[in-house]
Image (cartoon, rainbow, N blue to C red):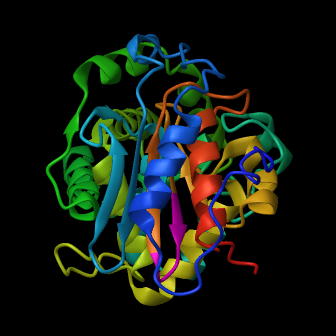
């Protein structure tokens, strides 16, 4: 989003960070930005109000700072890819995850079939659709129901809450996911899908249809920021040595075609979803989640990018500093 905030962002603080004021300022500054369009290629998503807007910072010591309606629910969509990737890595290990799912930007849209054709030895990364469907197919479970219990149980553990599938969104996506079905068959033809294609796509679709709040999402991110241990339940959800790999994948492809520019301008790993959510992780410090449905042409929330960029600057969060 560039440096549109630069003249009005507070000066970075060297000792105690006033997260409460920073969050309130970010919320106020971008509240009236109406740019972008709510996703409508999944019909159920088009019903969400463009006025929805919330920001939550969750720190590694369990503190919460928020503005807006932090309890409003929205479909997580591609945000779920990060947490299922974490689960796969716990089961398969770093080497197998890299070999089977990859860690390279495709340079093509997130649902590209051409990206698979150009490099069929693997789907390139687990945060594009092809790689995310492959991730689901890699889970160790005896049947699809058991896989689903792993997926939703893992999301619940990260959120420290009981999350649920939005049935309207799930049905809408199931009726319009022919492209993802084609991707799954294409990957199967290259030996890069590890279960029944129809079952894998259905699980992936159901995963994307899980509802959460901005508060839930910030807490999920804070577990990654806290080196894989939930600041809320105290449970270790990711082996500490796996966390840098998860963050690397987020940096590579977390914001679709906008990932490189995001890293250049903001310098912290983040992941977006077409439902309007973005969360970003500052390792060892905090996670920030923002919900605002209007998206830019890359499929990333406009206001969420602006607010997180503002907060990252105000807290000197750029990991390359």
Residue 73 screen position, x and y as percent: 28, 34
Residue at the image point whose x is 27% and y is 52% from the top: 147
Vertical comparison of 62 with 140: above or below = below
Residue 34, image x, y percentages: 60, 21
Q: In the rendered structure, which segment of residues is drawn in magenta?
A: 280-285
| Residue in front for this viewpoint, 251 or 93 | 251
Q: Position of residue 270 (x, y in %)?
A: 58, 58
Question: Does residue 281 show up magenta in the picture?
Answer: yes
Q: Decide if residue 142 is on the left or right side of residue 280.
A: left
Seen in the image, is 124 located left or right of residue 218? right
Q: Above or below — where is 167 with respect to 131? A: above
Q: How many marks?
A: 0
Q: Quadrant of the N terminus?
A: top right
172 or 276, which lies in front?
A: 276
- At which x and y percent is residue 275? 46, 31
Q: Residue at x 72, y 33 (%)?
A: 298
Inspect this view and state whether residue 306 appears. yes
Q: Residue at x 61, y 65 (%)?
A: 314
Q: Confirm whether the magenta stretch covers residue 240.
A: no
Residue drawn where x is 75% and y is 61% of the image:
263
Using the rendered view, name the quadrant where residue 90 is placed. bottom left
């Amino acid at each position: 989003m560039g440096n549109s905030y630069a003249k009005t962002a507070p000066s970075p603080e060297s000792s105690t960070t006033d997260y409460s004021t920073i969050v309130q300022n970010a919320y106020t500054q971008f509240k009236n930005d109406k740019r972008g369009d709510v996703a409508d290629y999944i019909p159920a998503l088009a019903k969400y109000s463009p006025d929805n807007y919330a920001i939550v910072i969750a720190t590694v010591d369990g503190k919460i700072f928020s503005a807006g309606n932090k309890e409003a629910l929205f479909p997580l969509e591609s945000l779920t890819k990060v947490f299922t990737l974490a689960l796969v890595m716990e089961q398969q290990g770093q080497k197998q995850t890299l070999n089977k799912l990859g860690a390279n930007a495709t340079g093509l849209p997130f649902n590209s079939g051409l990206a698979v054709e150009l490099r069929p030895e693997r789907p390139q990364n687990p945060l594009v659709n092809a790689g995310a469907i492959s991730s689901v197919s890699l889970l160790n479970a005896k049947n699809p129901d058991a896989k689903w219990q792993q997926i939703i149980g893992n999301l619940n553990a990260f959120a420290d809450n009981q999350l649920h599938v939005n049935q309207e969104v799930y049905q809408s996506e199931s009726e319009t996911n022919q492209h993802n079905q084609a991707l799954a068959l294409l990957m199967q033809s290259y030996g890069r899908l590890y279960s029944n294609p129809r079952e894998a796509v259905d699980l992936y679709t159901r995963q994307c249809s899980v509802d959460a709040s901005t508060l839930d999402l910030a807490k999920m991110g804070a577990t990654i920021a806290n080196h894989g241990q939930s600041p809320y339940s105290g449970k270790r959800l990711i082996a500490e040595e796996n966390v840098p790999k998860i963050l690397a994948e987020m940096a590579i492809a977390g914001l679709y075609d906008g990932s490189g520019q995001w890293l250049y301008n903001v310098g912290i790993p983040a992941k977006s979803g077409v439902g309007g959510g973005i969360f970003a992780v500052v390792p060892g410090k905090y996670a920030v989640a923002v919900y605002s449905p209007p998206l830019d042409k890359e499929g990333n929330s406009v206001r969420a990018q602006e607010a997180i960029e503002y907060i990252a600057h105000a807290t000197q969060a750029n990991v390359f500093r």
